[in-house]
Image: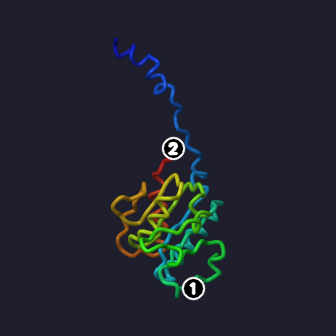
Amino acid sequence: MGIKALLQSKKFSVLRNRPKPMLPPSDTLFRKVGLVLCLSNVEQLKMVDILCRLFADQGDLCSVCIYQKNNKLIIPHSWGANDWLVLQPKHVNWYGLIRTGVADRFVQQPFDLLINLSPEYYFTTSYIAALTRARLKVSRYIQPYSPYQLVLGIEHAVDGDDFVRLLDQSLKHVKLP
């Protein structure tokens, strides 16, 4: 059997007739966005606020999940804290796994884009990212056994505006199936 006959056989017809992936228009590429953050100080909320407003201005839905290591930090209600999922140490077991049913509302959403804004590696935020059904998962840092498809490689502290600029430059080159 020659190569041409082999490729025309029924075995390879599935590969030959596979539909080509279609991209949505670029303005509707990310309609549902999720942000994950391990909060260590209130200043980090400025970046969350900037990103939420940016996505809201583009007509995108933005959901936020914050793991609060320190119970003493208070999230101001002016930043939409009523709509955010805030996890505290009591919602996490000794290993950093989220207790059953606590984050189901956030994890079960089909995100187009999930961004981990944590300044360094935290098991709990990576665990949340691994559980979500996002088409594209973005992180600031490189980590072993990463659930992320895009890593920005920001090792130093970056303010909100610079991070948004870096994220925007990186996402311009992304094409989702």
Within-10-Å neighbours for mark 2: few <14, some 14–19, many 20+: few
Q: Nearer the viewer, residue 93 or 122?
A: 93
Q: Nearer the viewer, residue 34 or 171?
A: 34
Residue at figure coordinates x 45%, y 60% from the top left: 138
Image coords of residue 130 (percent x, y): 47, 59
Q: Earlier in the sequence, mark 2 or mark 1?
A: 1
Amino acid carrying label 1: it is Ile
Q: Disc 2 to disc 1, how far (Cα)?
A: 40 Å
Q: Is residue 93 left or right of residue 4?
A: right
Q: Is residue 75 above or below residue 51?
A: below
Q: Nearer the viewer, residue 5 or 170?
A: 5
Image coords of residue 124 (percent x, y): 45, 69
Amino acid carrying label 2: it is Pro
Q: Is residue 61 left or right of residue 91?
A: right
Residue 141 sits in quarter: bottom left
Look at discs 2 and 1 and give the one toward the viewer: 1
Image coords of residue 41 (percent x, y): 48, 83
Q: Residue beneath label 2, please?
A: 177
Q: Residue beneath label 1, please?
A: 74
**Residue at disc 1, secondary structure:** loop
Residue 101 sits in quarter: bottom right
Name the colour scheme: rainbow
Q: Is residue 101 above or below residue 173?
A: below
Residue at figure coordinates x 61%, y 83% from the top left: 76
**Residue at disc 2, secondary structure:** loop
Residue at figure coordinates x 44%, y 71% from the top left: 96
